[in-house]
Image (cartoon, coloured by chain):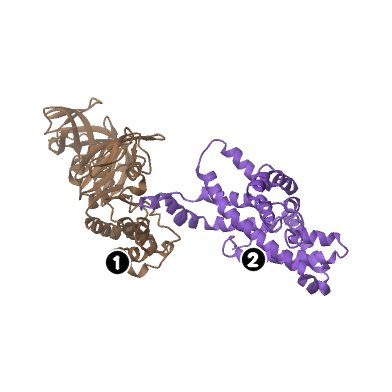
Chain colours: A brown, B purple
Amino acid sequence: MEVRTALGALRLDMKVQIEEGEVVALLGPNGAGKTTLLRTIAGLVPIQSGHVELDGEILEEPATGRYVPTEQRSIGFVFQDYLLFPHLSVLDNVAFGLRARGAGRAEAGRRAMEWIDRVGLENRAGSKPAELSGGERQRVALARALAPDPRVLLLDEPLAALDATTRVAVRRDLKMHLASFSGVRLLVTHDPLEAATVADRLIVMEEGKHVQTGTPVEVTEHPRSRYVADLVGVNLYRGQADHGSVLMPGGQVLAAAGAEAGEVFAVIHPRAVSVHRAKPEGSPRNVWHGRAHGVELYGDRARVMIEGEAPIVAEVTPAALAELKLADGGDVWLSFKATDVSVYPA
Amino acid sequence: MRRERAPIWIAILAAIGAAFFVVPLIGLVVKTPWGDALQSLTSTDTMEALKLSLIASLSATAVSLVLGVPLAWIYARIDFPGRTVLRALTTLPMVLPPVVGGIALFLAFGRRGLVGSLLDTTFGITLPFTTAGVVFAETFVAMPFLVLTVEAGLRSMDRRYEAAARTLGARRWTVFTRVTLPLIAPSLVAGAVLCWARALGEFGATITFAGNFPGVTQTMPLAVYLLLESNHPEGSFILSLLLLLVSLAVLVGLRHRWLGSA
């Protein structure tokens, strides 16, 4: 699928290929165009160029004027706030797609009931959506999307409308239900944990453009954008490698054991960065000067934001935080080993 | 929680405002000659007028629903040149003196009218001075209330439900009947009630276009007015009260379910 479209300030320019049986998560910050991309696949937002193709069938291609309307595309869509029809019972909601595609009342009711059983809501079939909890609504939305047996399942932030406690349980169920569906599954999220738990492959997009693709492990180990680095919680730099060091655009030189040649990314885990009040003397090849300007708690550790020629985040214990009075800010020195810098081609 | 108290001037003006509506109603109840009430009520003329009023106003409401809901849908959803002008024209009967509406209808659908002469010569249909003419006149003045209410409902509904229905394979007509209409049901009912109430009270356009023939075009408001002008004006009081009760019954009956009572 290749999609190009403009919507207000957003310019979407994406090329996405999804294989049968794959769970793919589209990860990106708010406003990156993730939802818009899903809606173009569903035919709810027109594309201006490129094409949308499913199983060899072109669904939309402005160049040839081809457009298959939404209702004729074999898709299931789970909307962010589910959009269960408030005037219909759970059973009628789930049966809606089957009825719309021509199944008789009895047949649709029977098949809808199977789906309601599968998501464990058999005693809620007669309830209206307003009477359900957030987690139950999510399951009804999933059952409703899957009941007509679509070839593609699109999920827009399926867990965003839930509170933190419910989310854990629902995420586990979602993973299970997604595994039982064999078609193409594309999920939109801005939650990296959700993406990593549920998906086989991540596609990171920012400002309507593709940034990075890979398995959750590949993406978290080799982030290729500030957004991903921030999500994973590591320091990311980009520069020119020169046999053992990386020259950054600001003029700063980073000693990095693995650096050879060419444009590279360099990643330093905050844990590897030591903070000192006086200039340290020792083996670490990298010694930077900077100013502490903020502290954040991160699990049982504290993360110190440091400004300097290149901004960096260091992770320290609460004891070190107190002893060095880092919360007060002020001048600091920091050091890290050249072997703690991971380098990969940009 | 402490109850909020109204500032004195607001309270006084509001009380005058309320009295403005309540006093005439009390007057109607107090001055009605209850002794003749039963006789006036059961007279064949009255019963015929009441029956005709109900049939005509309900028919006008039905016609308004069938034609007005699609019109409201077009106004709310389709952007076409001249939409504003057309909407203004179809809303005009709300502010137009009904007599003027009646004359306009006469010029268009009368026997010598623009369309009326065609109807007469080709189909042998004449509308003026028939019960169908009453329905015509009432629909003309009452339908705008329904169109405006339903259009507002369509504009404020969450259209993403329609998108959701389409992703489930529903064709546009199915989306309209199974999702859109149920979601705007409150506006639909409110619009229909307003429309019906306006049709029931219709006087000017009806008498101008359909005339005043007992049993054929003489609706309740016409009968009330005629009685008032006659030798027994008291008879009109009881008929007015009857109209009032019918209206009140509908308002109270619908209030709890649809009109958003507190």
Residue A38's place in the image compared with B38, above or below, is above
Q: Mark 1: few, some, or many residues within 10 Å (few <14, many ≥20)?
A: some
| Quadrant containing the N terminus of chain A in the rendered view | top left
| Quadrant containing the C terminus of chain A in the rendered view | top left
Residue A242's place in the image compared with B66, above or below, is above
Letter of the chain that mark 1 sits on in the rendering:
A
In what element is the residue under mark 1? helix
Q: Is residue B153 left or right of residue A240?
A: right
User: Could you confirm whether marks 2 and 1 are on the same chain?
Assistant: no
Q: Which amino acid lies under the numbered mark 2 shown in the image of this protein?
A: Val
In what element is the residue under mark 2? helix
> At which x and y percent is residue B131?
69, 57
Asked whether the viewer can see residue A262, the reply is yes
> At which x and y percent is residue A71?
36, 49
Letter of the chain that mark 2 sits on in the rendering:
B
Q: Mark 2: few, some, or many residues within 10 Å (few <14, many ≥20)?
A: few
Q: CA distance from mark 2 to mark 1?
A: 43 Å
Q: Is residue B88 left or right of residue B211?
A: left
| Front one among A342 and B89 | B89
Q: Which amino acid lies under the numbered mark 1 shown in the image of this protein?
A: Asp
Q: In the rendering, which numbered label is found on residue B252?
A: 2
Q: Identify the residue under disc 1.
A: A117
At a point 20% along the width and 28% down the height, the residue shown is: A239
Q: Is residue B31 left or right of residue A210?
A: right
Asked whether the viewer can see residue A323, the reply is no
| Front one among A83 and A195 | A83
Residue A273's place in the image compared with B143, above or below, is above
> At which x and y percent is residue B253?
62, 66
Q: Is residue B119 left or right of residue A213?
A: right
Q: Quadrant of residue A62?
A: top left
